[in-house]
Structure formats: structure tokens, C-alpha cells
Image (cartoon, grey):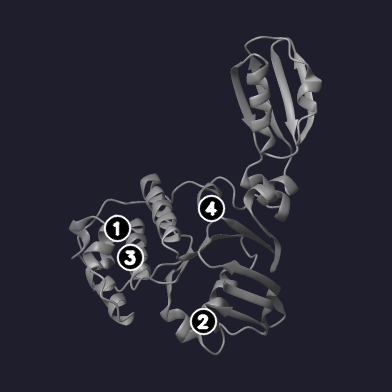
Amino acid sequence: MSVIETRNLTKRFGDVTAVDGLSFEVEEGEVFGFLGPNGAGKSTTINVLLGYMSPTSGSGTVLGHDVETESRELRARTGVLPENVGVYDRLTGREHVASAIRIKDADDDPEELLSRVGLDPNAWDRRAGGYSTGMAQRMALATALAGDPDLLVLDEPQSGLDPNGMQEIRDIVLEEAAAGTTVFFSSHILPEVEAVSDRVGVMRAGEMAAVDGIDTLRERWTDDTVVRATVAQPPVRPEMLADLAGVEEAEVEEDRVTVSCRRPRAKGRVIAALERAGGVADFEVDEGSLEDTFTALTGSADAGEQTASPNAEEPEVSA
């Protein structure tokens, strides 16, 4: 079953086409990574999918509901963590989560949700206007999880979080997926997308440049994977390695072996063959990353290395 499905979805603002003929599907229970450089149309796509904007043309359904005519129904079954988290300054963290539970007509325990996202218990009953960026992000994730949604839409969920917070987000995404929840995961932090996603879609200039599994995209869009090994018992015949499935080229110089692989999975065959030939003393692998794939698809390094925000997990201040 497709949880998200679009057909030629288009959104224009005057003369500007933000989303241009977008067609893709997200299957039930998968984690779908959504990538693209700034201005590619990601945020507009998310807003249309959630019914916050009407498409100019084309169609889209989420959880079987039309994005234009049944937005309330789809949002009732969707948990959303927006890119720019807004808080009600005078409400506490507990009150924010309790409100989300009431809106979803659920029976969750606010404390369980706040504990799950790692918000310090000392902050639960403090006004959210005094929260740091990271604290507000954790609280917003707790509200998104209210009501056990069928679909989680996470837009830059690691914003403002330190490395521990990013790991907690990753764990929650994997736990939700294991429980059958579909996760639509948009982020500029490519290693985080790579760690959790079953498939990724890469947008470029309002269009979907590619949709596929990460390994498949690597094979198609990045340079060869290179294995460099030191063998325990030289010499090794290069033709023994060159004949392996997925190997492009093999070079041997004394006890040093360098093998270029057309497919990432071929590296395992290379190491296994060297072990059978006498053993491997040491090896390293240069493998195309999701960042390389992203750059090849979009011509942009926009979503390259990114560290936590300067405001990440700021010390708590009193409201």
C-alpha cells in the first residue's frame, strides 16, 4: 500500500514553479529520506502533502486521503515535526504534549512521551518560552508522536540537537518504523538520512531527480568503491580478483592490493577472496557516500557536512 502517492504534482507561485510535475510513492512501513538543496522545493512539497497549500495541478494522496479535499482526515493520522518549531511561550512542555493528545483524542501519557524524546524532567513544567532550540525540538517531537500516528513527517528533526540528541532521534525513527509507522524524513544531515532510510528521493529545481535505495543510487551516481588491502601471504594474482562479479580493476604490488569495484557489495567478495588466498593483514575501503550521490545528482554541496546548530542543547534558563 502506498501511504504517500503523487501524480504530476505541481505548485506555482505566480511565475515561479516551486514543484514541477512531481510523481513518487512512499510505501507503508518504510523510512523515506527526502533530500534536496535549498530552494529545491522540499518544504513546498511537504506543505502540499499536509494540506497546508493546494496544488496548482496534479494530485496527491496521503494515507488514502486527497491532499486538497481531505486534509483534516490525513492530518488526524499524521504526526508532524515542522522545520521551524513554534511554541506557545506561556504553556509548559507538559501542556503542549497534553494538548496534542487531546487534539488526537488519544490516551497517551505526556510524561512517557517527554521521557521518550529525552527532555529533562526538570523542564516538563517550565514555560516553553524559556526553552533552548534543542529542548523545543524534543518537545515538538513528543507532540508529533501523540496518538500513535500512522505517518510521521519529520522536517529537519535534528535541528538544534547535539550528537546525543541526534542519536536519540535516529533510535526513535527506527523504533517507529519497526512498529509499522511510515516515516517521511527530510534532513540536510546526510549521514543521519543514510543511517535510517530504506529509500531516498532527491529533489532538484522542483523535480524529483532520483528515487531509489541508497546502494542503488551509489552504484549509479558515484565513483567506484575502492578496496586497499595488505595481504598476509603475497603474492596474489590480480586476475583472481578481476574475475570477481562487480570488480572493475585489480592491481597488485608486492603485498599491497588495490581493487576498484563497480558495486559496493563486491568489496565483500574481494576481502573473502584475499582471505582464502592467504589472509588479510589490513584493509581500508573508500566508498561513495550519500553526500557524493547528492552532489552528483544536484550539482550542489548544500547538504554536505553539517554540525549541530550553535544553539544546540543550550543550557536551560528559567522562564
Label 1 to label 3: alpha-carbon separation: 8 Å
Of discs 2 and 3, which sits in the foreground? 3
Label 1 to label 4: alpha-carbon separation: 21 Å
In this rendering, position of residue 312 left or right of residue 279: left
Of discs 1 and 2, which sits in the foreground? 1
Label 1 to label 2: alpha-carbon separation: 28 Å
Q: Position of residue 295 (x, y in %)?
A: 69, 49
Picture quarter containing residue 271? top right
Q: Position of residue 269 (x, y in %)?
A: 67, 31
Q: Are marks 1 and 3 in contact (CB under 8 Å)?
A: yes
The residue tagged 1 is 116
Q: Residues within 10 Å of mark 4 (few under 14, many from 20)?
A: many
Q: Residues within 10 Å of mark 2 (few under 14, many from 20)?
A: some
Residue at position x 45%, y 64% in the image: 180
Q: Are marks 2 and 3 in contact (CB under 8 Å)?
A: no
| Callout 2: SS | loop
| Callout 4: SS | helix
Q: Position of residue 72 (x, y in %)?
A: 45, 86
Q: Are marks 4 and 2 in contact (CB under 8 Å)?
A: no
| Callout 1: SS | helix
Q: Earlier in the sequence, mark 4 or mark 3?
A: 3
Q: Nearer the viewer, residue 283 or 155?
A: 283
The residue tagged 4 is 193
Q: Earlier in the sequence, mark 2 or mark 3?
A: 2
Q: Which mark is residue 142?
A: 3
Picture quarter containing residue 91? bottom left
Label 4 to label 2: alpha-carbon separation: 25 Å
Q: Position of residue 33 (x, y in %)?
A: 56, 59
Q: Which mark is residue 52?
A: 2
Label 2 to label 3: alpha-carbon separation: 21 Å
Vertical side of 237 occupied by 37: above or below:
below
Q: Earlier in the sequence, mark 1 or mark 2?
A: 2
